[in-house]
Image (spheres, helix red, strand yellow):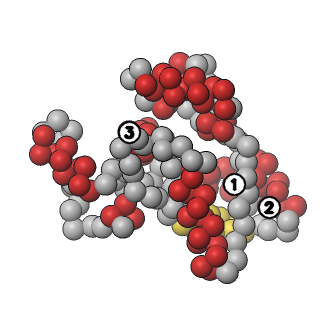
Amino acid sequence: FGSMRCDCGEQLQGAIDRIAAEGAGLILYMAQEGRGIGLVNKLRAYRLQDAGFDTIEANEFLGFMADERDWLMAALMLRRLGIDAIRLLTNNPAKVTTLRAHGIEVVERVPHAFAANPHNHGYLATKAARSGHLLGHPMPRSERLAIGRAGDEGPADPAPAEAGPEEG
């Protein structure tokens, strides 16, 4: 939960804060470390990422799918609690689709993105580009502008008038 290489810790704390502010909510902890590949394999994937693989390439090199998680248990837990409709804090459209396929009505997908840091901006960019996560720009605006000025990553900010959650 404290790794700087992902946004998991921020997502958990953000969910706790959001639930506290709204006065109601539920967090389901799913033991699916490393997008379902387990802690040891997550550490192996980190080693590959240090060698230049992105997060998806690392999982696939280790013989796994990009995301091994299954949300059936989450749907079963919700139903066991008598919950059949939810507002879901997620940036992952696949979670919405899968929960709906398992009979949970997702009445709203609530964006849940946080500012990137120097250790996770590549990871977040990969999640957005290759896994369809709805993150907006995963890098802080200052870093996007610096990269854009260097000319090696394309446009720095295609929508500079828009401020996303990473700006705060």
Q: Position of residue 38 (x, y in %)?
A: 68, 32
Q: Amino acid at mark 1?
A: Leu
Going by the image, does 78 lie left or right of 51?
Answer: right
Q: Position of residue 41 (x, y in %)?
A: 63, 26
Q: Nearer the viewer, residue 6 or 70?
A: 6
Residue contact between numbered discs 2 and 1, judged by CB atoms under 8 Å: yes
The residues bearing labels 3 and 1 have C-alpha atoms spaced at a distance of 28 Å
Going by the image, does 16 lie left or right of 124?
Answer: right
Q: Position of residue 76 (x, y in %)?
A: 82, 54
Residue contact between numbered discs 2 and 3, judged by CB atoms under 8 Å: no
Disc 1 packing (10 Å; few <14; some 14–19; many ≥20) = many
Provide the residue designation for mark 1.
Answer: 99
Q: Residue at x 68, y 68 (%)?
A: 86
Q: Position of residue 53 (x, y in %)?
A: 42, 24
Q: Which mark is residue 67?
A: none
Going by the image, does 74 lie left or right of 151?
Answer: right
Q: Which mark is residue 122?
A: 3
SS category of the residue bearing label 3: helix
